[in-house]
Image (tube, helix red, strand yellow):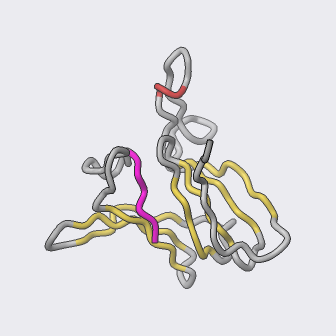
Amino acid sequence: MAWPRNDDPLEKSSSPYSFNEDFAIVSRAEREIAWVATTKTSSAVFRRFRDTRMGDPVDIDVGERAYVMTVADWKGKKVINYRLAPTPADHISPAQAFGMGADGKADAECGGELTVMGAAFKISSTNVN
């Protein structure tokens, strides 16, 4: 499980400035990532993500400012990056947003894969300066 800290376009209550009541769950059995929105009395899945490149997802990390998700693939011995929302306009000068996919309208976009020597089991995209 991961608690994304970002503005999620599918969940209006999300915020990059506090821990959300939303979280993402990795399912190895389903080879899927599911996002769940919670309240004090209920919970509901608001996004599901599957991709054939994810053979055995075991961990994820979701970026804080741009909605980039990194997936650790145990059996595939790799990490995979995905973009799940348009790049925010304030990240580019002059300001402009970039959509996903060839036409800029896709639901997600694979940013690439990195093969690792062993089985990837835990990842972090924390930037420490």
Q: Is residue 109 left or right of residue 15?
A: right
Where residue 93 sits in the image (x, y, percent)? 55, 17
User: What is the span of residues highlighted in magenta in the rendered image?
Assistant: 1-6
Foreground of the two, 48 or 103: 48
Q: Is residue 59 left or right of residue 25?
A: right
Residue positioned most to the front: 129
Where residue 128 sits in the image (x, y, percent)? 61, 47
Foreground of the two, 41 or 129: 129
Instruction: Name the residue at 55% across, 23% down.
Output: 92
Instruction: Name the residue at 33% across, 68% down.
Output: 45
Q: Is residue 78 left or right of residue 26?
A: right
Instruction: Name the residue at 66% across, 75% down.
Output: 121
Where residue 114 sits in the image (x, y, percent)? 78, 58
Residue positioned most to the right: 117
Residue 3 located within the stretch drawn in magenta? yes
Where residue 110 sits in the image (x, y, percent)? 65, 51
Q: Quadrant of the C terminus?
A: top right
Foreground of the two, 42 or 31: 42
Foreground of the two, 119 or 29: 119
Instruction: Name the residue at 29% across, 64% down.
Output: 37
Q: State the predominant SS element of the stretch in magenta.
A: loop
Residue 51 located within the stretch drawn in magenta? no
